[in-house]
Each structure stands twice: as structure tokens, then as C-alpha cells.
Image (spheres, grey):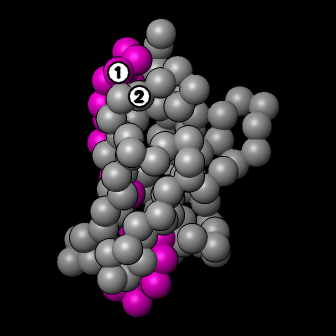
Amino acid sequence: VQLQASGGGLVQAGGSLRLSCAASRSIFNINAMGWYRQAPGKQRELVATITRGGSAGYADSVKGRFTISRDNTKNTVYLQMNSLKPEDTAVYYCNTASGSFNWGQGTQVTVSS
């Protein structure tokens, strides 16, 4: 499965972005998808997950600001990011919640102060 993340960019602190992740095949039977991020010099971290039924979970650092969703008919997972902070700057990736697919190139999010 190929995963293509898009929607990143440069935004000022307090701004918003919506990321999309398109899968090359159906994600309907994948129980949990997730969004990850990796900041320079840091390990990749899981920031949000969503089950096939729509139950979402978030890292404490993004809770209340980020919203994950999925559209199984479009094989796409989304991440709505509001109230962005400079510490959200990272390359964002999507994958299963266990990271079982090949990692795509990700999409760069840069938040300026």
C-alpha cells in the first residue's frame, strides 16, 4: 500500500491546516489508521489514531487542537490542525496505528512564531 500525505505548508502560530493521506487501496478493513510526526532530531511520534468505527485518540500534546477523520469510500484519512504552535513543526506521515505499511514521504508542516 502506498500512502501519500499532502496539505502541509507554512503557517503562523494560531493558524490552521488540513492534512490528507490518500491510500492506494481500500482502507475499509484496516482497523486503526494514524497520523505521525517527526521533528528534526526527534523520533517519530504517533499523534492521532482513528478506528474503522470512527473512535479517535490523541497524544496529549495535540488533544483539543487536532481532529482526525477518515473517509473509507475515498481511502483517505484527514488531520485537521487548529491553534497550531511552533512545536508542531514537523514532517507529518500517515500509516496504520502500528506502522505496518511502508512510510511515504510525508508532508512538511512549519509553524512560525
Circle 1 Cα neighbour tier, 10 Å, few/some/many (<14 / 14–19 / ≥20): some
Which of marks 2 and 1 precedes in the sequence? 1
- Identify which amino acid the numbered label 2 is placed on: Leu
User: Is residue 52 visible in this depiction of the protein?
Assistant: yes
Residue 56 falls left or right of residue 62: left
Is label 1 in contact with label 2 (beta carbons under 8 Å)? Answer: yes
* Relative vertical location of residue 53 with respect to residue 40 in this rendering, above or below: below
Q: Position of residue 89 (x, y in %)?
A: 55, 28
Percent of width and height locating residue 73 = 21, 77
Residue ID at (31%, 23%): 15
**Pick the front one: 74 or 64:** 64
Residue 52 position in % (x across, y down):
37, 82
Q: Which residue is mark 2?
A: 84
For residue 2, say whether it is visible: no
Q: Looking at the image, is 104 positioned above or below residue 113?
A: below
Q: Which residues are magenta?
A: 10-33
Which dot marks residue 14? Answer: 1
Magenta includes 61?
A: no
- Which residue occupies 56% across, 48% down? 60
Q: Residue furthest left?
A: 73
Classify mark 2: helix, strand or loop.
loop
Location of residue 62 with respect to 3 vertically, above or below: above
Residue 96, how many percent across, how many down?
54, 72
Q: Which mark is residue 37?
A: none
Amino acid type for the residue under numbered disc 1: Gly
> Residue drawn 48% across and 77% down?
32
- For the residue pair 2 and 53, the one nearer the viewer reads as 53
